[in-house]
Image: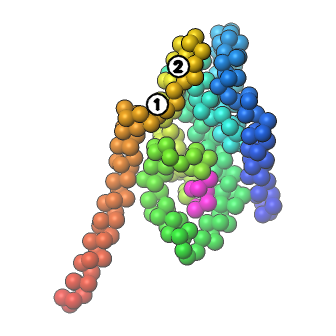
Amino acid sequence: MTRTARLIPILLILCAAVAGAVFLRDWLSFEALAQNRARLLAYRDGHFLLASLGFIAVYILIVGLSLPGATIATLTGGFLFGLFPGTLYSVFAAGTGAVGIFLAARAGFGATLAGRLQGGSGSRLQTALRENQWSALFIMRLVPALPFVLANLLPAMVGVRLLPFVVTTFLGIIPGTLVFTSVGAGLAKVFARGERPDLSVIFSAPVLLPLLSLAALAALPIILKKRKKDHCVQTEPSIKKGQ
């Protein structure tokens, strides 16, 4: 493929993201879900398989095209399908969309950018991510501090391999997806009270502490590797001096 042809997928995604932010924000919102909940439930009850496939397809498009509404999609999955299979549907769809945008970014500019990161902080970031791909990618998914779209694009920019990205994405998004799907499963009561769901639950201690614990566990290999490297640097002069 020519350089221009490789840029087409990521350019289409960027155009779709801008168009979605302008034209689809009202459609992919909690208010839209509340207004259409009866019709969605009726369609699910009458066409469960089509509703499941349609939900997964729309969620993949939302993530793959970086459209607004991924959180609403996860809540909708819980509202329509419950904790299970809602969590399964959302993890599969979000993971598939993330892999799609990663591949598009890597084909479009990721490989070129990765090759040009020479010297400075960009090169150090590239080296750090490549040396600790599994741990770093797991941390990016587990800690709800980095926007999901950046967690998809950044690895492509620094030349992360596909296998670690796929595995850490699908496994790393499970805890957060489980939390939001459980919130979605309780939306019927929220709708009955005329309220909005409390999405700050992800930052509450019972949820955040286990996520941070998992992130700390993922960071353990990085810490051990650095300690081992520092120990080797400290002992090397002593060995040379003894010789």
- Say which element carries label 2: helix
Q: Amino acid at mark 1?
A: Val
- Disc 2: CA contacts within 10 A as few (<14), some (14-19) or many (>=20): many
Question: Which mark is first along the chain, 1 or 2?
Answer: 2
- Say which element carries label 1: helix
Name the image quarter holding the N terminus. bottom right
Count of numbered tags:
2
Where is 88 relative to 131, above or below? above
Q: In the figure, is residue 239 to the left or right of 86?
A: left
Magenta segment includes 155: yes
Magenta segment includes 58: no
What residue appears at the point 34 percent right and 65 percent down from the top-left corner? 226
| Image coordinates for residue 45, horizontal then vertical, percent | 65, 10
- Disc 1: CA contacts within 10 A as few (<14), some (14-19) or many (>=20): some
In space, the residues marked 2 and 1 are separated at their CA atoms by: 14 Å
Task: Provide the residue span drawn in magenta.
Answer: 153-159
| Image coordinates for residue 223, horizontal then vertical, percent | 33, 59
Please say whether residue 78 is visible from this viewpoint. Answer: no
**Quarter of image, res 72:** top right
Q: What is the number of the mark on residue 185?
A: 2
SS assignment for the magenta stretch, majority: helix
What residue appears at the point 69 percent right and 51 percent down from the top-left corner? 104
Q: What is the number of the mark on residue 201?
A: 1
Name the image quarter holding the C terminus. bottom left
Question: From this viewpoint, which residue is outermost toward the left?
Answer: 242
| Image coordinates for residue 112, horizontal then vertical, percent | 67, 66
What residue appears at the point 58 percent right and 39 percent down from the top-left corner? 95
Q: In the figure, is residue 12 to the left or right of 147?
A: right
Q: Amino acid at mark 2?
A: Ala
The reply to whether the C-beta atoms of the residues labelled 2 and 1 are less than 8 Å apart is: no
Q: Nearer the viewer, residue 233 or 150?
A: 150
